[in-house]
Amino acid sequence: MAEDKKQIKTTVHPAENQHDENTVCPLVDIYEQSDGTTVMLAEMPGALPDSIDVQVDKGVLTIAAKCGDDKFSESYARVFTSFETGDYFRAFALSDEVDRENIDAKFDDGLLKLTLPKAEAVKKKKIEIK
């Protein structure tokens, strides 16, 4: 018997990314909170905090960052590597439900957290009966 699956509506969708041999597409998790706020977590190990660039232009949210130098490259010989090297870039198409003026970004320990609140125009509103 097939189980009923709860369908989750998201307001952020991956867009076509500019990906070349020197660019890494960061891993991203997207969550929707009960109040409709969308939270994005992007893993960006080695990113330089001052180089992180988050922009919204024509409905597209872009995340970009430069990576620091590999501090072990001179004194160690690599035996195994899981981390991809290069600068970060990823893009997402935003729906009109996102309040683009109040997006919040925080970066801590290689994790970029973006909070995308729902626009007031699309929030559920109780209509008073007179």
Image: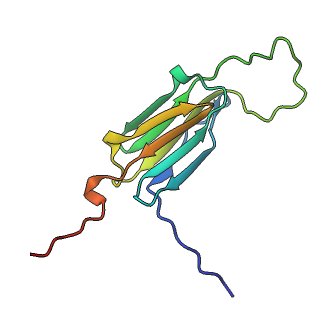
* Residue 15 is at least partly visible in this image: no
- Point out the image quarter for the N terminus: bottom right
Looking at the picture, how far across and down is residue 5, in whole percent?
59, 75
Asked if residue 64 lies left or right of residue 34, the reply is: right
Q: Which residue sits at x=44%, y=41%? A: 61
Looking at the picture, how far across and down is residue 110, in whole percent?
62, 32
Asked if residue 69 lies left or right of residue 105, the reply is: right
Q: Which residue sits at x=55%, y=23%? A: 49
Specify the farthest residue to the bottom.
Answer: 1
Closest to the observer, 30 or 91: 30
Q: Which residue sits at x=48%, y=41%? A: 114
* Residue 119 is at least partly visible in this image: yes
Above or below, 49 against 44 in this view is above
Q: How is the image coloured?
A: rainbow
Looking at the picture, how far across and down is residue 87, in whole percent?
62, 27
Q: Which residue sits at x=66%, y=26%? A: 46
Q: To which quarter of the image does residue 3 belong?
A: bottom right
- Point out the image quarter for the C terminus: bottom left
